[in-house]
Image (tube, coloured by chain):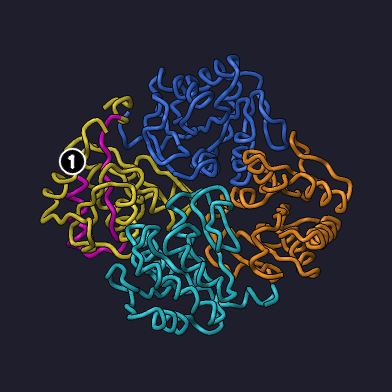
Chain colours: A blue, B orange, C cyan, D yellow
Amino acid sequence: MSHKEIRSLIRIGVIGGSRAKTGFLAQAREVGRLIADRGAVLVCGGLGGVMEEAARGARSRGGLTIGILPGTQPSEANPHIDVALATGLGYTRNSLVAMNADVLIAIDGEYGTLSEIAYARIYGKTVIGLGTWEVKGVVPAASPEEAVRLAVKAVPDGR
Amino acid sequence: MSHKEIRSLIRIGVIGGSRAKTGFLAQAREVGRLIADRGAVLVCGGLGGVMEEAARGARSRGGLTIGILPGTQPSEANPHIDVALATGLGYTRNSLVAMNADVLIAIDGEYGTLSEIAYARIYGKTVIGLGTWEVKGVVPAASPEEAVRLAVKAVPDGR
Amino acid sequence: MSHKEIRSLIRIGVIGGSRAKTGFLAQAREVGRLIADRGAVLVCGGLGGVMEEAARGARSRGGLTIGILPGTQPSEANPHIDVALATGLGYTRNSLVAMNADVLIAIDGEYGTLSEIAYARIYGKTVIGLGTWEVKGVVPAASPEEAVRLAVKAVPDGR
Amino acid sequence: MSHKEIRSLIRIGVIGGSRAKTGFLAQAREVGRLIADRGAVLVCGGLGGVMEEAARGARSRGGLTIGILPGTQPSEANPHIDVALATGLGYTRNSLVAMNADVLIAIDGEYGTLSEIAYARIYGKTVIGLGTWEVKGVVPAASPEEAVRLAVKAVPDGR
């Protein structure tokens, strides 16, 4: 992939807890792989748990990964993040994760994930859910495959 | 009230939609009145709808009102805000509303309110709900009276 | 002062180092006193050094003080702050200090103060300087009296 | 370049006005080219003027470009940005530009650039200057070549 193409790729955000259970971590990894297979860029919060497994999956298939971090040091990102962006905003950075994805997949997750779901909806983005908060506006998916398929479909052409 | 006392007062956040229906606006006004009657400071997002009615209610009883605004101009605040704080953060300021209240009362509300509920929980604050999102961690109240009573009770002494 | 009047008062920002030398601290205290004597509200970063002495001075004359903090806890503010606003933005909150003052007085200061001077100018606010950075756009004053006099004069009527 | 390498590259920030004069724009373009030739990643504010010319130069030599934007839409970035990050922070995002570079080169510039210089110094980063603000802590360079050479030299090994 040449750099010039990066800008034209769709960006799929993966949000979820930094302390998710094993089953969700495996799902996150698979979601990451499928995102890369689709030629999309992964956007996430850059830390551990669901964020790290999704990034690990995406990188294992040659995908590009962006991590939008709460702290002030790009080096805080998990090792599977290609482009680490420090914000120094703490949890307030959750808004920026939603802002920088065309569509989001929420996996498990606690209140941080809920804030990202809310911001995604504020910004008019579709949110696909895998075992996450059941709130209005989250489209449930039954598997990583379905989640990524629905996510890609939700991004308007010529975005 | 002398200025020196302001710092010692508890702060109750009121969150809710800028386009709430009439019934919720009346509840917001009553919540504002009761917050002032309890000697608490009102914290809100500083704009219209539930925020404005809560501030109107609080001011009608001599309470102090703080508005944490999305834009860059303090003058954007509704006329019932005493201390208008501009942030220039857009919707991302929702995190700061939750951060600056000891406890929050959510009235009606859309995704902006959901993001504030989520941030309140991230920051470990109790959220009382009046006709709002039914998510884990929101304590439902049946009336403005009950909401304010529960809110005051939820603030630890010596906070 | 009734609460209703707070909104109509001009706001003077005082910016400067948290580790200023004694002479500058005395100047900050005097600037704070004069701000209160003029009936203006003091806005500052809420921490120690110049911020604390300015707030101490303003409060000693019955003025209202607002502190816009880098951390997530309003309780971090120095004891002379009436309205403490937590932002969780770290140094990035410097922009908000400038945004929330009608005019600023810079006293001594290091790079944090320089960032606030820059933001004040970005937002079109006048900056008066007392022994601070000598950059284009800072109006030098020879004493606290002159600084506060020039500051009040710089705020447009009907702001 | 494989994605995996991106993380290991040094990041050079280029800051400067969106309305710089022609001579400075040519310097920015040359700085961008030299950054890419050195194998470094360009970080900038993502908009026009110096930011755009530096990105144009970097991309013309196959370099990767990151733009940290004031608005909420990644699509606001100039066409030479590979990884566009929306922040929705307005001018407050200047802090994040400094935070995400290992070293910065300031070219011309007004108060926005001054705020970025200040933040770079707050975060302990070296700032190289080309016709920019002459303030303490800015290391002057006589040409784009010297600026990029000094910048690369200033980044600690094993950062």
- B139 sits left or right of B4 in the view: right
In the image, what residue occupies the spot 40% across and 24% down?
Answer: A80
Q: Is residue A157 visible?
A: no
In the image, what residue occupies the spot 73% across and 46% down?
Answer: B155
Q: Which residue is mark 1?
A: D152
Say which quarter of the image contains residue B119. top right
- D50 sits left or right of C59 in the view: left
* Mark 1, secondary structure of its residue: helix
In the image, what residue occupies the spot 31% across and 45% down?
Answer: D43
Image quadrant occupied by the N terminus of chain D: top left
**Looking at the image, residue D159 lies above or below residue A25:** below
Q: Is residue A13 visible?
A: yes
**Looking at the image, residue B125 lies above or below residue B36:** above
Q: In the depicted view, which residue is nearer to us: D31 or D94?
A: D94
- B45 sits left or right of A59 in the view: right
Instruction: Verify whether residue C127 appears in magenta.
Output: no
Image quadrant occupied by the C terminus of chain D: top left
Q: In the depicted view, which residue is nearer to us: D13 or D26?
A: D13
Measured as percent of width and height from the top left, residue D153 is found at 16, 41
Measured as percent of width and height from the top left, residue A108 is found at 63, 25
Q: In the depicted view, which residue is nearer to us: D12 or C135?
A: C135
The amino acid pointed to by label 1 is: Val
Measured as percent of width and height from the top left, residue C117 is found at 37, 66
Label 1 neighbour load within 10 Å: few <14, some 14-19, many 20+: many
Instruction: Verify whether residue D22 appears in magenta.
Output: yes
Which segment is the magenta one?
D8-33
**Looking at the image, residue B28 lies above or below residue A98:** below
